[in-house]
C-alpha cells in the first residue's frame, strides 16, 4: 500500500468515527479540516448528502453575472489556462462569488455532467453550511487557500473529489470570489493548489491593473472636462514647442480653429520669450507673465502662466501654457475694485428746461460712440451724467473708470493714464503697471477736470484718440485700446485755448458732443424736488422717520446761490437731518452762511473769470444778488413776526439799531 493510499484510508476511518460519535483523530485529520467538520456538524449538514439545494433562479443568476461581469471576464482567461494543463483528465475549474455561489465553470464534458448531479454548477451555493467541507466553502470560512481531498470532505458523495481553492481579493483587499480546481482525488497533486494560488494572484494583479486603468481613464476624462470648461485658455506643447492639445477658449483667444493650430509651433502665435524657453529647457515654471499674441487675425495682450510636463524620470517632455486675455483680467479687477457705473438717467432729479435739455442731449450721446464733453461748475453732476451715458450705451457691461486729471501729480499723470513697464523710472513696480486706458478697455474712461491736464500729456492723449493705440512709459510695444472717452471740466475750455493752456486740436477732438450742465442757482424750480428727494433718501439710509418740515425752509433754500451746486445742496440736507436728530426740521438747522448773507461766499469758487475787469463786474453782480437775498430774508422775517423789530433783530442775532441801518440801506419801508 502506498503512503497516499495509507493516508487516504486513515482519513476515511477518521471521517466514519467522527460521523458516528463526533471524535476527532487529531494526528490523522488536519486542524483546518477538523474545525470545518465541527462547524458542519453544528450547522446540521447531512454528511451523507453533498448535493447543493440552495440554487439561484435564472433571474438571480443573471443579476449576479452582470454585477460580477468584470471579475468573470478577467478570471475566465486564467481559468482557461488552468484547464489546458489538465484537459482530458477529468478536472473542472470553477469560479464563485464571495458567498459561494458558482458563477462560471470550465471542464471536461463527462466531469461537468457528473458534477451537475451534485449541483456543482452555475447558480448553486457551495458554502460550508450547505454542502459541508469543500474547497470553495472552506476557503471562504478560513479566508485562505486550501485543498480538500477525498474523505476530508464532510459529505460522503463528494469523497470522490479533490478540490483546490483560493479566495480572490480586489485591489482594496475586499473578498470578491473563490477560484477552485476540482477533479478525481486519485489524480490530484499537491502542486494543484499552487497552480490555483498562482492563477488567483494573476487575477488579482489584473484586477489591480484594470482598476488603475479605470482610474486613469476617469482622471483623464476629468482633466479633459476641466480643460474644456476652465476659464483660461490652455495650450499643451511638446519639448520642441509644438502644439499637441488646445481647449476651446484658447481657440477663441487665438481667433483660430483647432485644426489650424495643432502641429504648429507655439512661437507662431506667442512672442518668443525666455519664460517659455526656460519652461521647455529647464522645467522652470512661470506665472502671470504679460505676453503678446500675434496672429493674422489678432494682435493682443494676455496674461500667461506655464507649468512643465515631466515623465516618470523627471525629464521635461513639454509644458502646459495657460492664457488669460488682459481685458478679461482687467474687467475682473475693475468689477471688484468698484470701477463700475452706478447712476442712471432716472437718478437725475429735476424738471427745469435747462436740465431736461442736457438729459435729452446726453441720451442721444449714449446711442453712439462719439466723444462727449461735459461742462459745468463743480457739483452740477458731471460724473452722474457720465455714468448715466455709460449705463445706457452699448458699453454698459464694460468697466467705467473715472480719473480726476487735476488731482494727479503732474509727473505721474502719464503713467496713470498710459501705464509703464517695470524699471522705467524710480519707484516703478518690477512687473510694470497697466494704465487707465488699458483697464477701461471695452468700457468708458471718464476724464474729469480735463482742463487741468498738462500740455505735454495733452499731445499723447490726442494721439491715443486718433490711433486708438498706446505705448506704456518705458516700453516699445503698441497696445490697441477700445475705450470711449467722456471728458468734463468746470473751466471754459475755449477760454483756456485762447490763453494757451489747452490745445485747440485736442479741444476739437473732444468737443464732438458738448453738454452744458446748468448750476443750481439757474434752476431754482428744482430746489423743492431736490430737497424732498434727498430728505427721503437720507432718512431711509439713516433709518430715521420722515420729519415734519417748516414751510419757511424752502424760501431760505431758494434765496441761497449754492456755489457748490447739487453736491453742496445734498450735504446741507444731510447736515440738517443730523442736527435735527429726529425732530422737526426748520430754518434753525440751516448752516449760518445760508441764514446770514454777511458770511456768504463773495465769489463762487469755480466761476471762471477772464480778467480783473470781469472779476470786478462779477463782484458787483454778486453784491446785488446778496442785497436782494438779504432784503428778501428781512422782509420774510418781518412778515413772520408781524413787523416786530425786536423779534426780528433777536432772530438775526443783531441789535435793533443795526437792523434799522439795514432797513435804510436796503430801502425797506415799515408800514
Image (tube, rainbow, N blue to C red):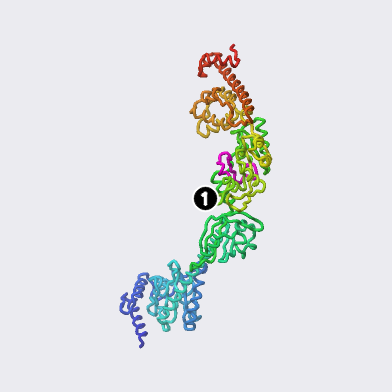
**Label 1 element class:** loop
Is residue 57 magenta-colored? no
Place residue 29 in its image quadrant.
Answer: bottom left
Q: Position of residue 93 (x, y in %)?
A: 47, 77
**Residue 501 vs residue 392, the one in the foreground:** 501
Q: Position of residue 266 (x, y in %)?
A: 60, 62
The residue drawn where x is 61% and y is 48% is 441
Q: What range is drawn magenta here?
A: 390-413
**Residue 263 vs residue 299, the one in the foreground:** 299
Residue with the most extreme top position: 671
Is residue 406 magenta-colored? yes
Quadrant where the N terminus sits is: bottom left
Location of residue 272 with respect to 78 vertically, above or below: above
Query: Magenta part mainly helix, strand or loop?
Result: loop
Q: Position of residue 100 (x, y in %)?
A: 44, 70
Question: From this viewpoint, is residue 515 visible?
Answer: no
User: Mark 1 — residue?
Assistant: 429
Location of residue 517 with respect to 269 vertically, above or below: above
Question: From this viewpoint, is residue 537 visible?
Answer: yes
Amino acid at each position: 500500500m502506498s503512503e497516499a493510499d495509507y493516508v487516504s484510508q486513515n482519513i476515511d476511518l477518521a471521517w466514519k468515527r467522527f460521523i458516528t460519535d463526533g471524535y476527532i483523530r487529531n494526528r490523522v485529520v488536519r486542524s483546518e479540516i477538523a474545525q470545518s467538520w465541527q462547524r458542519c456538524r453544528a450547522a446540521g449538514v447531512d454528511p451523507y448528502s453533498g448535493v447543493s439545494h440552495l440554487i439561484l433562479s435564472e433571474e438571480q443568476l443573471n443579476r449576479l453575472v452582470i454585477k460580477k461581469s468584470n471579475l468573470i471576464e478577467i478570471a475566465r482567461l486564467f481559468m482557461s489556462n488552468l484547464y489546458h494543463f489538465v484537459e482530458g483528465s477529468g478536472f473542472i475549474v470553477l469560479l464563485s462569488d464571495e458567498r459561494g455561489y458558482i458563477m462560471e465553470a470550465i471542464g471536461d464534458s463527462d466531469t461537468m455532467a457528473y458534477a451537475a448531479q451534485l449541483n456543482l454548477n452555475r447558480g448553486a451555493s457551495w458554502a460550508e453550511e450547505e454542502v459541508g467541507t469543500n474547497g470553495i466553502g472552506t476557503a471562504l470560512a478560513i479566508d485562505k487557500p486550501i485543498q480538500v481531498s477525498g474523505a476530508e470532505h464532510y459529505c460522503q458523495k463528494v469523497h470522490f473529489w479533490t478540490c483546490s481553492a483560493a479566495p480572490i481579493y480586489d485591489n482594496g483587499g475586499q473578498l470578491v470570489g473563490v477560484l477552485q480546481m476540482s477533479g478525481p482525488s486519485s489524480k490530484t497533486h499537491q502542486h494543484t493548489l499552487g497552480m490555483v494560488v498562482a492563477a488567483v494572484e494573476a487575477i488579482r494583479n489584473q484586477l489591480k491593473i484594470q482598476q488603475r486603468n479605470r482610474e486613469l481613464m476617469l482622471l483623464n476624462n476629468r482633466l479633459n472636462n476641466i480643460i474644456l470648461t476652465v476659464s483660461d485658455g490652455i495650450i499643451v506643447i511638446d519639448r520642441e514647442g509644438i502644439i499637441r492639445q488646445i481647449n476651446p477658449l484658447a481657440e477663441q483667444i487665438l481667433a483660430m480653429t483647432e485644426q489650424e493650430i495643432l502641429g504648429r509651433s507655439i512661437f507662431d502665435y506667442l512672442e518668443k520669450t525666455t519664460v517659455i524657453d526656460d519652461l521647455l529647457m529647464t522645467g522652470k515654471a512661470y506665472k502671470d507673465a504679460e505676453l503678446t499674441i500675434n496672429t493674422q487675425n489678432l494682435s493682443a495682450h494676455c496674461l500667461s502662466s506655464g507649468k512643465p510636463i515631466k515623465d516618470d524620470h523627471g525629464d521635461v517632455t513639454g509644458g502646459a501654457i495657460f492664457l488669460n486675455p488682459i481685458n478679461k483680467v482687467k474687467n475682473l479687477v475693475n468689477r471688484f475694485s468698484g470701477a463700475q457705473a452706478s447712476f442712471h438717467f432716472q437718478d437725475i432729479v429735476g424738471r427745469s428746461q435747462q436740465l431736461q435739455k442736457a438729459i435729452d442731449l446726453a441720451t442721444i450721446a449714449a446711442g453712439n460712440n462719439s466723444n462727449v464733453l461735459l461742462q459745468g461748475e463743480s457739483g452740477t453732476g458731471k460724473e452722474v451724467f457720465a455714468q448715466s451715458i455709460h449705463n445706457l450705451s452699448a458699453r454698459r457691461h464694460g468697466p467705467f473708470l473715472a480719473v480726476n486729471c487735476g488731482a494727479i501729480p503732474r509727473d505721474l499723470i502719464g503713467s496713470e493714464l498710459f501705464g509703464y513697464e517695470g524699471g522705467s523710472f524710480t519707484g516703478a513696480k518690477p512687473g510694470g503697471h497697466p494704465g487707465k486706458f488699458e483697464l477701461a478697455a471695452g468700457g468708458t474712461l471718464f476724464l474729469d477736470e480735463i482742463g487741468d491736464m498738462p500740455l505735454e500729456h495733452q499731445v499723447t492723449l490726442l494721439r491715443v484718440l486718433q490711433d486708438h493705440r498706446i505705448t506704456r512709459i518705458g516700453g516699445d510695444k503698441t497696445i490697441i485700446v477700445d475705450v470711449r472717452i467722456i471728458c468734463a471740466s468746470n473751466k471754459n475750455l475755449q477760454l483756456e485755448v485762447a490763453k494757451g493752456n489747452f490745445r485747440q486740436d485736442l479741444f476739437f477732438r473732444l468737443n464732438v458732443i458738448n453738454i452744458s450742465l446748468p448750476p443750481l442757482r439757474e434752476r431754482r424750480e428744482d430746489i423743492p424736488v431736490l430737497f424732498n428727494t434727498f430728505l427721503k433718501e437720507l432718512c431711509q439710509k439713516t433709518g430715521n422717520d420722515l420729519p415734519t418740515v417748516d414751510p419757511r425752509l424752502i424760501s431760505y433754500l431758494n434765496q441761497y446761490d449754492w456755489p457748490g451746486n447739487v453736491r453742496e445742496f445734498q450735504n446741507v440736507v444731510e447736515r440738517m437731518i443730523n442736527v435735527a436728530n429726529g425732530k422737526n426740521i426748520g430754518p434753525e438747522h440751516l448752516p449760518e452762511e445760508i441764514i446770514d448773507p454777511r458770511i456768504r461766499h463773495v465769489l463762487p469758487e469755480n466761476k471762471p473769470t477772464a480778467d480783473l475787469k470781469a472779476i470786478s463786474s462779477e463782484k458787483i453782480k454778486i453784491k446785488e444778488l446778496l442785497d436782494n437775498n438779504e432784503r428778501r430774508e428781512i422782509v420774510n422775517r418781518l412778515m413772520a413776526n408781524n413787523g416786530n423789530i425786536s423779534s426780528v433783530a433777536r432772530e438775526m442775532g443783531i441789535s435793533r439799531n443795526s437792523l434799522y441801518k439795514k432797513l435804510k440801506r436796503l430801502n425797506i419801508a415799515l408800514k
